[in-house]
Amino acid sequence: LMIAVLGGGAMGAALAVRWATAGAEVALLGTDFDTPVLAAIRDGRAHPALGVSLHPALTYWSCDEWGSVLPEAEVIVVALSSAGLRDPVAIGAQSARADATWVIATKGWQEDTFESPTEVVGSILGSRQRTVSLAGPALAAEVVAGEPTAFVFAAYDAELGKRVARSLRSNSTATVVTDDVVGAETASAYKNVVAIAVGMCEGLSERFAESALNRTFANGRAAVFAQGMTDMVRLVEAKGGRASTVLGLAGAGDLYVTCLGGRNGRF
């Protein structure tokens, strides 16, 4: 299986390593923003964001070299920020195979249109049937280290989702497949909002700890977490998704790990 990963940041590199470890042939395709990352890796240095060397079988390609790789890729993994999603995908789609599967690891909504990542990629491809949304609790540092991780593959085409999920499954990687794309994408985005609120409670507890008042705000953090889950269910259902998706890996699981160690929880 030939996989091309668009985006050389922490998550893109971590997913590339995970797929390579599972036995796939993987090419890591950097954007214009990833030039320092590719330079460091090609010089034998560690990935700047992850602090580790990557899988020896990976190959690395800059933006002007994508046309040499994408026509061969059966699966294209999109690991870009939501703000920088549209243009690179549009460029990549010009040379990608018509039957390629697009796995979207991007989380969030477009600032101007509120489109989800699958909606953006689907509009560029002309259909969402070849797209699979990747969700679930997966900190990049643990993904690249091979620590136990469970991913959700949400796809409109169930068989397509199952095939991609099987390609990543291993002793340390569990995969779940769902057809609730709206639920998975909405939960994946909204959990960041909730994690910031929970992190604010954490920040307050640290402030009081410094003043020797010894208040942890654990009750407050739990209340915000629970209310955030409730709001997430309401939002997902209003958009046509299912509450069960929020109660699983894409919602509760991802929110929990983001509160513990994600960037939005620390913010």
Image: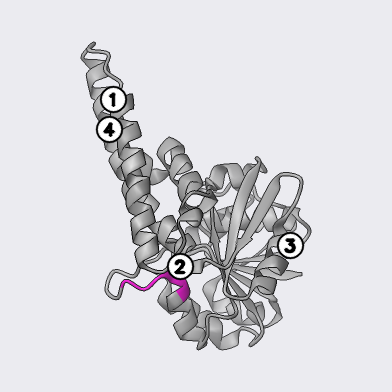
Q: Earlier in the sequence, mark 2 or mark 4?
A: 2
Mark 2: give few (<14), some (14-19) or many (20+) Cα within 10 Å: many
Q: Which residue is mark 3?
A: 167
What is the three-letter code of the residue carrying label 1? Phe
Q: Are marks 1 and 4 in contact (CB under 8 Å)?
A: yes
Mark 4: give few (<14), some (14-19) or many (20+) Cα within 10 Å: many
What is the three-letter code of the residue carrying label 3? Ser
Q: CA distance from mark 2 to mark 3?
A: 23 Å
For discs 2 and 4, the disc positioned in front in the rendered view = 2
> Is 135 or 139 nearer to us in this picture?
135
The residues colored magenta run: 114-118
- Please report the residue visible at 48 percent of the width from the left and 61 percent of the height from the top: 184
User: In x, y percent, where is residue 171?
Assistant: 76, 45
Q: CA distance from mark 1 to mark 4?
A: 6 Å
Kindly tell me whether residue 50 is visible in this rendering: no
Q: Which residue is mark 4?
A: 201
Q: CA distance from mark 2 to mark 4?
A: 29 Å
What is the three-letter code of the residue carrying label 2? Val
Q: CA distance from mark 2 to mark 1?
A: 33 Å
- Please report the residue visible at 57 percent of the width from the left and 68 percent of the height from the top: 179
Q: Dividing the image into 4 quarters, which one contains the N terminus? A: bottom right
Q: Earlier in the sequence, mark 2 or mark 3?
A: 3
Mark 1: give few (<14), some (14-19) or many (20+) Cα within 10 Å: some
What is the three-letter code of the residue carrying label 4? Cys
Q: CA distance from mark 4 to mark 3?
A: 40 Å
Mark number displayed over residue 217: 1
State how many labels appear.
4
- Horizontal relation, residue 145 to residue 93: left or right: right
- Horizontal relation, residue 53 to residue 237: left or right: right
For discs 2 and 3, the disc positioned in front in the rendered view = 2
Taken as a whole, is the magenta stretch helix, strand or loop? loop
- Please report the residue visible at 63 percent of the width from the left and 61 percent of the height from the top: 177
